[in-house]
Amino acid sequence: MIRAEINVLPYRGAKSQFSSWICEAIWGHRLERQPVSALLLEFLSIAEGLCRKQQLLQHGCEDVVYTPYLCTQLRNILFNNPMIDEIASGLENDDDAWARWLDEMHTSAVANRTDLRNYEYLRKRFESFDSFASIVSLLRRTAMDTHSNRGWTYRLLYPIGPYAIFDEATLKPDKSGFSTSRVLFTRTGELAYLMLSRSREEVRHRIAQHLSCAFDPELPSNRLLRRLLSTPQPDTFTEKHGTYLPYKDHPAFDRMAEDVLALFDLGLPSSDVFSHLGPVMALHLLLYQLETANALVGTEELPCIVCEILAPRACLVRRAALASITDNESLGMQAVRNFVCDQLDGDAELHQVLSRTDLDAATKSAVFRDRAKELFNLKNELGTHGVNEQRDELLGIAQSSYRDTVGDAVRSLADQCGLRSRQRTVSYRYCPSDDLLRNLVYVRVTRPAKESDFLQDLYHRYRLVIGPEEARIAGIPEELFDKAEYERNRERLLLRLMRMGLARRMSDSFTYVVNPIAENNGH
Amino acid sequence: MTYSPGEQWIRLLHGYSPVMENAGMTAEHIGRLEDRTGVRRLQFQHPAYDQLRSAILPDAGPPKNVILTGTAGDGKTTLAAQLYRDLHSTEPDRQNEIETIAFSHDGRTVDLTFIWDITAWRAIVDGRLAQDQVGVLEKLAHSVLGNAENQLFVIAVNDGQLHEVLRCLPDPPSLELAKLRKEVLRLHASGIQDSDHRLRLINLSRISSELLMQRCLEAVLDRSEWRCFDEEPSNPIFSASSSVRLNYRLLNTPAIRSRLLMLARLADACGFHMPIRGILCLLVNAVLGHPDAKGRVIRPQKGIEQVVAKPAYRAALHRTLFGEHLTPATRHRREVYRFLSLLQVGLETSNDLDELFVFGACDEELKEQYRSIVCADPCSQRNPHFEAMCRTYIRGDLGADEMQLFLQELASERRRLFLTASEDELDKLGLWDTTVFHHAGRYLSELLEPLHQGRAISLDLTRRIVAGLNRIWTGLLLADRADELYLCTGLDRTTATQSDILRQQIDVFGTDGSAVRISLAENSLYPQVEIGCRERVFRFDLTLGRFEFLCRVAEGAMPNTFSREYAEDFSMLKQRCLAKVCPPVRANIINGIRITSSGRIERVPIHLSEGVDG
């Protein structure tokens, strides 16, 4: 039981900074929109910080405290260093180039500590300024989201080693150093980490082993990063804590952990696994949100996700996919309403006061206001008079809070994992991208699987409805069900998988779904 | 209505045509036609027959049970029936879905049970196989696992039904049935033919389409019944101007037969299997197809003389062979037409060729070539109105509808030439450029042909293939002929658009196990590229599609722009290749790259220690 009292953990931190405590009580602190790169790096940042403390995936239900890297020098060199190419190409004399560059850095580099503003050590590390510049250029190519126009303190690197995993920071107003911020790292990546840390022990343990290898400071690419630092380890930032995941146990935890482990077990070369990890975690966070919302609405299971495999023109499956996304996106709102009503209705003391006939309306209203503030940690008192009006106002606050945070996160997660699309339609509907389909095959197929088994597995595990059999089992309403249409949808999926090299057709339209990467490894 | 012998022959052939709505009933339909017409059906020795026979009657070792799988129309049941006839000297009854005969082998009497078609045999009640049928499979399992020496089975089954039946076994199945299921699924999924137990799984879809085309051509064209053209010249169907006669004549020329074999070879090269039923349908439709006939296929019936009297070009071979006269739905039902439409023959434009078609009649420089190549038309295949259309086109007088028609006819002319041109002309006239595979000619002549003959392919072609790989896998414009294969990655991902870290440099013609080889494994339909790096080897199939992509990229096409699908395919191949041949190492150096003026890559070592670069 997801929402059983025994399964819900109390939040031990201070709630004073929150305007209300409603969505946080349901999904945790917190689910919020963030780019998939930030989701991945925030997850890796907490994992790396805890790996350094020898506590990787060992916390269970306690508050997790870690210290992320700040990597002041690395970030200044890579992202706050616009003159390097001009200096490298403009000055023939190496000493002049170094002198000019060090001068530039002296004025422009930002650091919280004075010793981190000094870049003289680099001169001894490189044969020439040119070779230094070429390595900077090489490392810059590993930057993520290069198309975005974020400030340099928000630029992130692909996780080529532990020193490429650092916390986001903002410049102090006087540009004298960095201070903390929660613009990119909105805690959703930390929430993903907490989900993994509460998964089955044996799976968690194996994920920890894989992650520890990825955090090895002696990785060649990490050693390249280290060459740019004055110290053997990068500088760290402010200690972080306080992320809250309300449930001790949740079906989403094991589901995510198993898929993450399956990705690591593929043995993809280099750091390729991370380009799949972000979208896979986004999918699982989305499923976590949906399943939790559904539990509050009354059903302890994932709602159906009807997927259109991109059809050439409008069809019944497209209508069903549109209806499915609308239903699922409204689940969260219903969950929030149910949560508020359940809390109010379950408050015996409040109930007793409101049912007393000897109290006037103003007194009841005052009691309700106080109780609501306490129950939901409202920052501002309810402004209306009359219990019914106050109740409506409270629901309004809850829904508005949902829309701005979790509701927005859900849409963003669906985009990041490749589940949602507007291709060939005006509105969004569930229409999986090639990347999502590839990730599903990577995590679910180790040896050739019958197409029907694959589709059934996607249904039972993620409630993805693609073929006619799954649509029938899912109980798709009659007006949105036509066997032939879902048959065509299934056929489109198989054709796409075949084109992507992920399916092998045999006779009489019989198809095996295959994972070439797993086959490569002799699984 | 009485029919002449020639007409009976055409009636039988009509049974193979694409008009047949329910392709699954073709065998039964042909059987009835055979009885009615008194003409023997189209027959030939199936290429897989020896594999079947040698499993049941091995020269040495124990005999094996056989499961025949394959796509509909591959001849599973026919093949099993042929074995039945050979061993029992009678026709199978086929009224029963299962039949058992006894035969002697090595002094022992063996009971051989045939299940002609598992789809018709199996009965599933409440999701489980009927008890008596489970009993039959128990016996099969017992035999496969070596515990019943004198009992063998031959089972014909479609791939999907094979899984279906195994899924419907009792839950839990007996130990032997469970073992049988595991073994059959293992063989089926991995494409292995012989099990360590007494079981052989023959997948007829793996038989080369070229071989099947060869047998089908002989079965259709070499029949003595075609003497009807000489014996019944007054019959409109067999008259001198009839499209049937002209198309048969053209189809029976060595050049066209060889072109059809080439098309089948291309199907193999694309990983596209042509089932026997599809090939026979293609050939019959090529001869009998006519846009004005009822059902669009000629057969003896009332009013056929008016159809045959129409100009033969309307049913020319280059139109009927590609199913131009059939409805899109009919074409789509047959895999063989889906394959031909994939080739897009005639649909790609080619400047030189189109110039010849359009201006050849009036341009002095082109006239001679035009006369010898375009006008040569001994079988009246050419549209006589096309020249007039060209003249109107040149004058710019074509309306929108006429322009559409003109473009269709132009494509048709390209197809005609593609079909009738000699092998030399195919290359010389750039006829491959009118298909989607511009390099298919090279694939066949420079790659498949030498490999089939046991010769090595030319060094230049190997260099070109490697150049394509280098360009795709590095994202850099390197030399268009390569002596070294560069396995590069980004610092972050192996599939980085620009891969500037050199992980391995392999001498294409190296001798110490590090080399790139292109070879053809026995029984394989397409060549394999083998990338060796010391002890480690990575192989991938070089299908026609991949070859085309490599050649185009080697010539300078941008991988992602030319084909996103193949760009992703090669991206995955690169991931697999690196995982296989470049294990992670803890070196003190990583190699950056520098491109030389000749388009080669030079290592630029980057030291990882904190000391100064050496």
Image: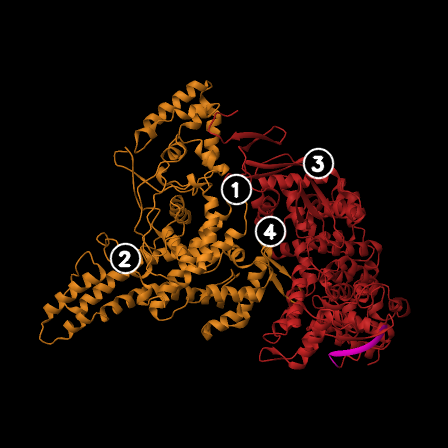
CA distance separating discs 1 and 2:
43 Å
Chain A shown in which color? orange
The residue carrying pointer 1 sits among few (fewer than 14), some (14 to 19) or many (20 or more) residues within 10 Å by Cα, namely some
Chain containing mark 1 = B
Image coords of residue A225 (percent x, y): 45, 35
Amino acid type for the residue under numbered disc 3: Gly
Give the mark nearest the N terminus, 3 or 1.
Answer: 1
Query: Residue under circle 2?
Result: A11
Q: Are marks 3 and 1 on the same chain?
A: yes
Q: Nearer the viewer, mark 3 or mark 1?
A: 3
Q: Where residue B589 sits in the image (x, y, percent)? A: 54, 32
| Most foreground residue, A53 or A24 | A53
**Secondary structure under the numbered disc 1 in the rendered image:** loop
User: Which residue position is annotated with label 4?
Assistant: A521
Q: Is residue B39 visible?
A: no
Residue bearing mark 3: B510
Please provide percent x and percent y for residue B299.
78, 72
Q: Amino acid at mark 1?
A: Ala
Magenta span of residues = B96-104
Q: Earlier in the sequence, mark 2 or mark 4?
A: 2
Contact flag, marks 3 and 1 (Cβ < 8 Å): no
Q: Residues within 10 Å of mark 3 (few under 14, many from 20)?
A: some
Name the amino acid type tagged 2.
Answer: Tyr
